[in-house]
Image: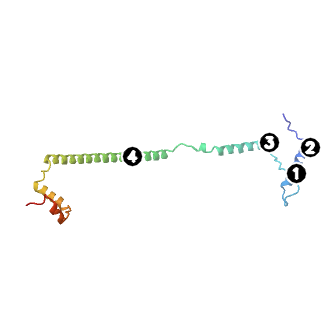
Amino acid sequence: MSSGFISENEIAEKRRLRQEEWEKVRKPDQPLEVPEEEYDHRSLFDRLQEQKQRKEFEFEEAHRLKHMIKGLDDDEIEFLDLVDRSKEEEERKKSIEEEREIADFRTKVILLQERSLGQRIQMEIKGKPPPPSSNSGRSSQMKLLAGAVVKKRSSDGQNTSPKRQKN
């Protein structure tokens, strides 16, 4: 355990060290000798009390956000309830609207399917269209022949061809 007694030699040694440090950092406009440390004339209890208060203040500043949580007032609770109810009402209306739109879409799809099915049945009832008449077959044959290219015959080819000569 160290004693609280400080000898004059220790005090002189501390002054000398402070003076050497002062000479290293001293500026030309500052005094040559190091200024004496300010002596606090307050009692030890007062100084310790001040240190304690300073530490408590620093601790409170560091943990201030933890203590900022507070309960809600009645007005705030009512407002938040009102906001929640309005959001729920909007969501309910939106879901009802979506269900109605889906139901309308399904009924329209069913109607379209029934119409197309009815049209197919009508077409089958009417039967296949009658087969084309002979005139229409002949006209289509004429159309095909109209697009054909006819070669000119040479005069030599007519004399030598036995099929073409009839006597």
Residue 91 got which mark?
A: 4
**Is label 1 in a helix, a strand or a loop?**
helix
Residue 9 got which mark?
A: 2
User: Alpha-carbon neighbours of circle 3 within 10 Å: few (<14), some, or many (≥20)?
Assistant: few
- Separation of marks 1 and 4 at Cα, in angstroms: 79 Å
Label 1–label 4 contact, CB within 8 A = no
- Separation of marks 4 and 3 at Cα, in angstroms: 69 Å
Label 1–label 2 contact, CB within 8 A = no
User: Alpha-carbon neighbours of circle 4 within 10 Å: few (<14), some, or many (≥20)?
Assistant: few
Label 4–label 3 contact, CB within 8 A = no
What is the x, y in percent for residue 161?
15, 59
Amino acid of disc 1: Glu
What is the x, y in percent for residue 44?
80, 42
Q: Is residue 40 left or right of residue 87?
A: right
- Separation of marks 1 and 2 at Cα, in angstroms: 17 Å
The residue mark sitting in front, 1 or 3, is 1
Amino acid of disc 4: Glu
- Mark toward the start of the polypeptide (1 vs 2): 2
Q: Nearer the viewer, residue 49 or 16?
A: 16
- Mark toward the start of the polypeptide (4 vs 3): 3
Amino acid of disc 3: Leu
The residue mark sitting in front, 4 or 3, is 4
Label 3–label 2 contact, CB within 8 A = no
Residue 67 location, quadrant? top right
Up the image or down, 144 lies above or below 75; here it is: below
Tag 3 residue: 44
What is the x, y in percent for residue 120?
19, 47
**Is label 2 in a helix, a strand or a loop?**
helix
User: Alpha-carbon neighbours of circle 2 within 10 Å: few (<14), some, or many (≥20)?
Assistant: few
Looking at the image, what colour scheme do you see? rainbow
